[in-house]
Image (spheres, rainbow, N blue to C red):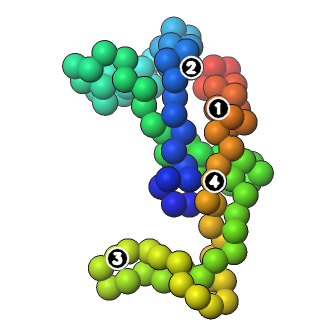
Amino acid sequence: MPLDSTQVHLKLPELLAIVEHGSALTNQLTLLYHQWAGDREWPEPTLYDPLAVTFALRPDLCPVTPMRLEVTDAGVTRPVAGAPNAEVCLHSDEARFLPLLLSRILE
């Protein structure tokens, strides 16, 4: 899952729903958010890991494309010609992912 395919943009209404919920989980997420945000006033975070983890349960949220990838000596992963050796998520469904994420966090 390339980084750009897992970018989920948490907008202010969703962020406030998490901050205002008041469960043990959302309180921890709120503390983490404030550490990340620092002195900035309500920046909208970009989430990466939640979509990658959700893929294990809901692969329909990030359909894959067969590709051949290689890793260069410099550590760069890039597509090359040849028989596929990986299935790669190029575009995720952020609109369907966010309600699922919030339904789990706000239980």
- Quick one: SS at disc 2? helix
Amino acid identity at mark 2: Glu
Q: Position of residue 8 (x, y in %)?
A: 54, 39
Mark found first going from the N terminus, 4 or 1: 4
First in sequence: mark 3 or mark 4? 3
Judge by depth and name the residue closer to the eye, 15 or 21: 15
Crowd class of label 4 (few under 14; some 14 to 19; many from 20; radius 10 Å): some
- Separation of residues labelled 4 and 1 (CA atoms): 15 Å
Spot occupied by residue 18 in the image (x, y as percentages of width and height)? 53, 17
Callout 1 crowding tier (Cα within 10 Å): few <14, some 14–19, many ≥20: some
Nearer the viewer's eye, disc 2 or disc 4? 4
Residue at the left extreme of this rendering: 39
Q: Residue at x 48, y 39 (%)?
A: 47
Using the rendered view, name the quadrant where residue 67 is placed: bottom right
Q: CA distance from mark 3 to mark 1?
A: 32 Å
Q: Residue at x 56, y 60 (%)?
A: 1
Question: Disc 4 designates what residue?
Answer: 91
Residues at discs 1 and 2 in contact (Cβ within 8 Å): yes
Q: Amino acid at mark 4?
A: His
- Residue linked to disc 1: 98
**Which numbered circle lies on residue 75?**
3
Q: Are marks 2 and 4 in contact (CB under 8 Å)?
A: no
Cα separation between marks 3 and 4: 23 Å
Which quadrant is the C terminus positioned in?
top right
- Please indicate whether residue 14 sits to the left or right of residue 30 in the image: right
The span from disc 3 to disc 2 (Cα, nearest Å) is 36 Å
Q: Position of residue 97 (x, y in %)?
A: 67, 37
Instruction: Let me know if residue 33 appears in the view.
Output: yes
Label 3 or label 1, whichever comes before in sequence order: 3
Sequence order check, earlier mark of 3 and 2: 2
Residue behind mark 2? 14
